[in-house]
Amino acid sequence: MPSAPANPSFSCAPGFDPAPPPAPAPPPLSCAPGVDPAPSLLRRLWRGWSTRLCLIALAFYTALALWGECEYRAARLRGETPAYNLVDENHRYEPPTLSSGHLLGTDNLGRDVLRRLVQGTRIAYHVGIMTSLIALPLGVLLGCLGGYYGGKMDSFVVWLCATVSSVPSLLLILAVSLVAGKGLAGIYWGIGLTTWVGVCRNIRGEVVKHRGRPYVEAARVLGYSNFRILFRHILPNVMHIVLISFSIRFPAAVGTEVFVSFLGIGVQGEPSWGVMLNNARLRLWQGVWWEMAAVTVAIFGLVLVFNVLADRLRDLLDPTAAA
């Protein structure tokens, strides 16, 4: 029996392709030249005109503080009286003028108000930074431990926060300052050991929310230790709270130092803003207004700058702020 002929090969009309080639893959996404797909925090802050002005003002305050620190250290190295503490009886109560060389006038001892104001900025930065180095690590550590472990550890952290916050903050600061001694060291410990409660509560609340999320459960399944999960996985996700807290508590610490120094318990022998206010109030009735006006404007400007930046940082870093 003859076999069936093989099927003839399929052919198409000329110009017809039965299997068109696949469409070319789309080109990789790229940004226009000079565009950063993940702009930094500083660049995002720079976009708003209000925060831009605040950043410029903050840079100006920082430059004043650095200049004051250099002047202070140079005088100590030479073993001489700093220029801002030099007494000149012939130039007492001089008003602000350009011709005299005293742009902000002089005080009752002929000391230049501008130089002393710069030193007050240096002390304000010292207080804000040093108290933050005490309060923030303590609040973050206790908040992380209480929020992650729960149980008795959480109960102890909540009880400690409630105990510290139940004592009037000013009285507690004064008590710690008196124990630690007058001067900047007492201010550092007094403010630092009494202002960690708010940071601790915020960090604890964030850690409680994160400890049950899938990435934490996956880390537990992989056998990671609690220390690694807490400080290498959860803590980086709540660091925005630390940055926002620093921007809020920095001016608060400066204001507390001004008040304590105004009462005569804080800084000794240095032109803190609180000391300058305490000296200036005694001479207002004589018409010597420029020292108090200069210190008031400086404090107002620093507090305003940090408050505006804190609000903007919260908008940028806290995902629940827009909710």
Image (cartoon, grey):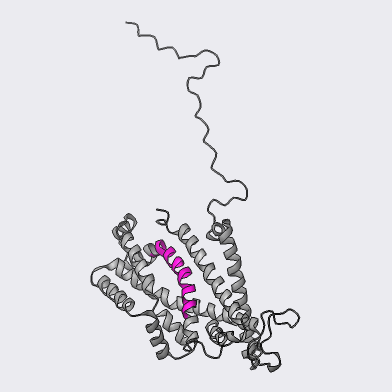
Vertical comparison of 120 with 36: above or below: below
Q: Quadrant of the N terminus?
A: top left
Of residues 220 and 267, the one drawn nearer to the viewer in this rendering: 267
In percent of the image, x 50 and y 81: which residue is there?
A: 258
Q: Is residue 258 left or right of residue 286?
A: left
Q: Main secondary structure of the magenta part?
A: helix
Q: Is residue 199 above or below residue 12?
A: below
Residue 149, horizontal then vertical, whole percent: 28, 68
Q: How many marks?
A: 0
Locate residue 175 relative to residue 16 in the image: left or right: left
Q: Residue furthest left?
A: 151
Taking the spot 32% from the left edge, 70% from the top edge, the residue there is 145
Query: Residue at left 48%, top 57%?
Result: 316
Residue 166 x/y as whole percent: 31, 77
Residue 295 or residue 118, whichever sits in front = 295
Q: Is residue 170 left or right of residue 292?
A: left
Residue 239 falls within the magenta-colored stretch: yes
- Determine the residue positioned at 46% across, 66% down: 243
Query: x%, y% of residue 162?
Result: 30, 75
Residue extending farthest top: 1
Q: Is residue 265 above or below residue 191?
A: below
Residue situated in front as seen by the camera: 189 or 207: 189
Is residue 99 part of the magenta span, yes or no? no
Q: Looking at the picture, how far across and down is residue 310, in whole percent? A: 48, 65
Left or right: 11 as drawn, with respect to 99: left
Part of the protein shown in magenta: 235-256
